[in-house]
Image (cartoon, rainbow, N blue to C red):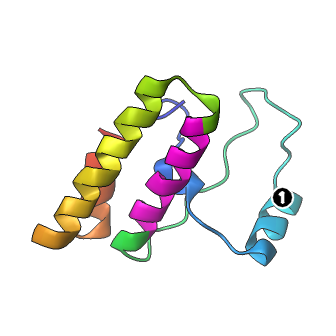
Amino acid sequence: DFGTRGLSILHFNRVSESEKRARVRGNDMSNFSRKNTLPAVPAPADFSVNVGAVEVLCAIAQLLYKPVVYETLVAALKFLGELRVSELPSSPEALRWSRG
């Protein structure tokens, strides 16, 4: 669903327990029809939000997906880490790169 129904890596960013409860109350996760849309993506506060979202995806992929998916996300995380050291891009720019 990445790029086709609006799924973004920012849907996987880290949230506090109170934010998590508020999101669960606000979304009907039992309705998977096309008329039920994904929640709006929060705007990234800074570059670390993007990195945190990829870290969460890595943890999920390691448990639930084939190794190639996990390895791809680890490579993306390494790439973002190198960007952080060499030239810190703006969050929207980094998000466009990670969406592909």
Question: Which of these two is toward me, 95 or 79?
Answer: 79
The residue lying at 40 percent from left, 62 percent from top is 51
User: What secondary structure characterizes most of the magenta part?
Assistant: helix
Question: Which of these two is toward me, 96 or 82?
Answer: 82
Residue 11 image point, x, y percent: 58, 53
The residue lying at 55 percent from left, 54 percent from top is 56
Question: Which of these two is toward me, 70 or 100?
Answer: 70
The residue lying at 61 percent from left, 56 percent from top is 40
Q: Is residue 41 magenta?
A: no
Relative to 63, does residue 41 appear above or below in the rendering? below
Residue 90 image point, x, y percent: 24, 70
Task: Report the span colored magenta.
Answer: 49-62
Disc 1 target residue: 24
Question: Which of these two is toward me, 13 or 31?
Answer: 13
| Quarter of the image that includes the N terminus | top right
Residue at disc 1, secondary structure = helix
51 sits left or right of 8 in the view:
left
